């Protein structure tokens, strides 16, 4: 899917919060690249100032990660409902037969494909969703006979499989703690080393 189609699809569906989320993730990636540069350049130049700045940035990012994890866990039901609403909107957009919306329909179809293949599901919930599943060409052939609808899979993801997201966040947090420890050890080692 072309990157320019994603904002168009989100705006047309009224999901500006997802678009804001995408932009936030891009900004976080840029900040992480800058922080990584600070750490590497500070270590190469043996600069206490750069290593101290690297440590401070890591502390801030660690605090943001913990806050985002707590917020996400507390609001997992709301996030699940909004994901289901987003899926329904994309599903309706992909199944519309309007000729002037071919580009948006193709974008919605690509998003649906990601949903269906990732969650191993097909269709909306309820009896109408089951009928859609049997008649729709939006679902891959092997998933059309699968009786699991995407509403159920999304709810399960945020209730039963939330521990997987927690484990991934914990691994990242442990790596960040080690980065903070090593940067402070290196900074203290530079301060205590004799000047040549």
Image (cartoon, rainbow, N blue to C red):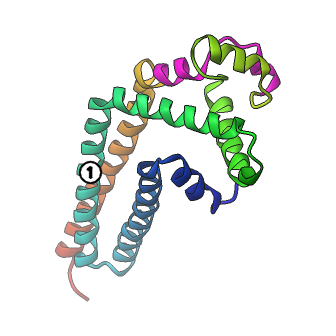
Front residue of 93/173: it is 93
Please count the marks in the image: 1
Element type at marker 1?
helix
Residue at 75 percent of width and 27 percent of height? 139
Instruction: Check if residue 89 falls in the magenta segment.
Output: no
Q: Residue furthest bottom?
A: 196
Determine which quarter of the picture holds residue 58.
bottom left
Left or right? Give the position of 24 relative to 178: right
Determine which quarter of the picture holds residue 132.
top right
Determine crowd level at label 1: few under 14, some 14-19, many 20+ residues with C-alpha closer than 10 A: few
- The image shows residue 154, relative to residue 45, as above or below, that is above
Front residue of 86/72: it is 86
Q: Quadrant of the C terminus?
A: bottom left
In the image, which residues are magenta?
140-156
- The image shows residue 37, relative to residue 88, as above or below, that is below
Percent position of residue 173, x then y: 33, 44
Percent position of residue 32, x then y: 40, 63
Front residue of 26/13: it is 13
Instruction: Check if residue 149 falls in the magenta segment.
Output: yes
- The image shows residue 181, relative to residue 174, as above or below, that is below
* Disc 1: which residue: 64
Residue at 74 percent of width and 45 percent of height? 98
Percent position of residue 130, x then y: 67, 14
Main SS class of the magenta portion in the image: helix
- The image shows residue 47, relative to residue 129, as above or below, that is below
Left or right? Give the position of 179 relative to 144: left
Residue at 55 percent of width and 51 percent of height? 12
Front residue of 55/93: it is 93
């Amino acid at each position: 899917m072309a990157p320019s189609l994603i904002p168009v699809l989100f705006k047309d569906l009224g999901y500006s919060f997802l678009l804001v989320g995408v932009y936030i993730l891009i900004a976080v990636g840029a900040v992480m690249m800058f922080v990584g540069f600070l750490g590497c350049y500070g270590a190469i130049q043996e600069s206490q100032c750069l290593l101290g700045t690297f440590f401070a940035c890591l502390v801030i990012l660690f605090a943001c990660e913990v806050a985002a994890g707590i917020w996400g866990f507390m609001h997992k039901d709301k996030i699940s409902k909004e994901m289901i609403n987003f899926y329904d909107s994309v599903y309706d957009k992909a199944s519309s037969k309007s000729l002037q919306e071919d580009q948006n329909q193709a974008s919605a179809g690509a998003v649906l494909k990601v949903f269906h293949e990732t969650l191993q599901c097909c269709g909306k919930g309820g009896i109408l969703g089951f009928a859609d599943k049997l008649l729709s060409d939006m679902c891959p052939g092997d998933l059309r006979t699968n009786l699991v609808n995407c509403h159920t899979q999304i709810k399960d993801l945020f209730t039963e499989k939330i521990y997987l997201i927690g484990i991934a966040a914990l691994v990242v947090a442990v790596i960040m703690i080690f980065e903070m420890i090593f940067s402070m050890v290196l900074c203290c080692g530079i301060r205590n080393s004799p000047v040549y």
